[in-house]
Image: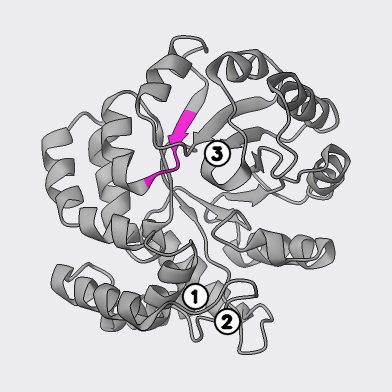
Amino acid sequence: MFKGNIVALITPMDKKGKVCQKSLKNLIKYHIYSKTKAIVSLGTTGESSTFSKKEHINLVLSTIKLSKKKIPIIAGTGANSTKEAVLLTQKFENSGISACLSVTPYYNKPSQEGLYQHFKTISENTYLPQILYNVPSRTGCDLLPETICKLSKLKNIIGIKEASGNLARLNQIKNLVDENFLIFSGDDSTALDFMQLGGNGIISVTANIAAQEMSKICKLSLSGNFKQARKINKKLIKLHNILFIESNPIPIKWAAKKLGLIKNNTLRLPMTQPSKKLQKILSKELKKKKICLTKKNIFNVFKKNKKK
């Protein structure tokens, strides 16, 4: 269920910054149609840090409801307070959630022992499957392979999103954990190489606008057909990089609006609109690559699913 292309979903908003339920429903339909394996609701790309606890819970529950059990939903439940992370995780018990994605505590800069105790405490206070999330560039701390190994032995810690961009880290982790422990890339530009080295898939930003391509890349890679996967990925390499010229989710949200996936590309402060220079670069790349996602295709998908 959790192997392959998982999207780190953007959060669609109206002009006032409130969640747009219609656009959210359309996004979910798009990913079901594109054979995305699961949706992460309110991870980094979903602007989780700008949501109140009540808003956070309501959005995840709405995503579960709108999915109609047609695609697994993974809830972002990380916090830099262990107590808050536990309480947020517990709110999704008996909700129909498939797993939780829990980022390393940001800003605090805990030691490896602190990180171990943080995730151990969460694990001991819920039955929900936990996926660790290591993204040092965002959090200011790095979850090391030895600590991941210790955590992998806990009852409901099932995998990790490794977003350091360091491919050597994959083998370091694989050599320490059981073969059933899931290891996902959190870096679109190196995801194919990550899977060729034995990774189980990606939790992707690019998949927000190129879900079909990312699903094909993952399916081909996990079946060992790296030659064909690389042909598809070659068309997306420049896009992967452009989407991170400015902080995520600024570029991806603008691109989703440009392609008609969402009505507005509203961001909550302190995130602001992309620069004119980035808009020009991104617009040119979207036209050049002619990815599967086009306005005509999107509307056909929405129309087709509306009847169901």
Residue linked to disc 2: 22
How far apart, in angstroms, are the residues tagged by discs 1 and 3? Answer: 32 Å
Tell me where residue 215 appears, x and y as whole percent: 32, 50
Q: Where is residue 231 in the image (x, y as percent from the top left)?
A: 11, 47
Closer to the camera, 97 or 259?
A: 259
Per the rendering, the mark at residue 26 is 1
Chain-order first, disc 2 or disc 3: 2
Question: What whole-number distance in Å separates the C-alpha atoms at marks 2 and 3?
Answer: 34 Å
Q: Is residue 50 above or below residue 99?
A: below
In this view of the protein, which residue sits in the foreground, 86 or 269?
269
Q: Which residue is drawn at 66% across and 50% down?
A: 75
Q: What residue type is labelled 3?
A: Pro
| CB-based contact (under 8 Å), mark 2 and mark 1 | yes
Badge 2 crowding class, 10 Å Cα cut-off, few under 14, some 14 to 19, many 20 or more, is few
Visible residue check, residue 212: no
Quarter assignment of residue 141: top right
Circle 2: residue type: Lys
| Mark 3: secondary structure | helix
In this view, the residue in front, 91 or 106, is 106
User: What secondary structure is the magenta-colored segment mainly?
Assistant: strand
